[in-house]
Amino acid sequence: QVQLVESGGGLVQDGDSLRLSCVASGLTFGNYAMGWFRQAPGKEREFVAVISRRGGNTSSYADSVKGRFAISRDNAENTLYLQMNSLKPEDTAVYYCAVPGSTMRFSSTPDGYDYWGQGTQVTVSS
């Protein structure tokens, strides 16, 4: 079965950087677009970034993270990354990686994804 395991979260200060990782198994990783989402306490899960399958030549970001976050993938290692720079307190959330059930899907909404990791907590203090 498909498994996604995130890591790399932690407690950092305003302006710091973090890199999240998501290791996937149970699927041909390179054949699928992959996404990052986040959920803050009391809020809906929201889109952060998505990267296209295979070479990952296409990506899309939420306006709130554009220019600060970068999504990338290593298909040989079955790993998805999210480099987060210039972190702000409002970036505090649990971050999830996700994969759609279809190789043809490239989505920026949670409904477009079928498999989710357990999440990793990112806390940014002011």
Image (tube, grey):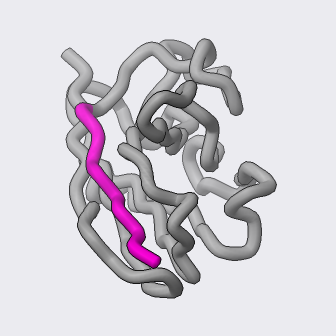
Left or right of 16, for residue 87:
right
Left or right of 15, for residue 21:
left
Range of residues picked out in magenta: 118-126
User: Of 92 and 55, which appears nearest the observer?
Assistant: 92
Q: Which residue is at the far front? A: 126
Secondary structure that dominates the magenta span? strand
Left or right of 75, for residue 89:
right
> Residue shown at 22%/34% (left/top)?
25
Tell me the quarter of the picture where residue 110 sits: top right
Q: Which residue is at the far bottom? A: 15
> Residue shown at 75%/65% (left/top)?
66
Tell me the quarter of the picture where residue 4 sits: top left
Q: Quadrant of the N terminus?
A: top left
Residue 39 in picture, x, y percent from top left: 47, 37
Membership of 124 in magenta stretch: yes
Residue 86 in picture, x, y percent from top left: 57, 82
Relative to 91, say whether 1 is above or below.
above
Relative to 29, say whether 124 is above or below.
below
Left or right of 10, for residue 97:
right
Residue 75 in picture, x, y percent from top left: 39, 54
Relative to 41, say whether 64 is above or below.
below
Residue 98 seen in the figure: yes
> Residue shown at 41%/40% (left/top)?
97
> Residue shown at 42%/48% (left/top)?
93
Residue 60 seen in the figure: no
Residue 119 in picture, x, y percent from top left: 29, 39
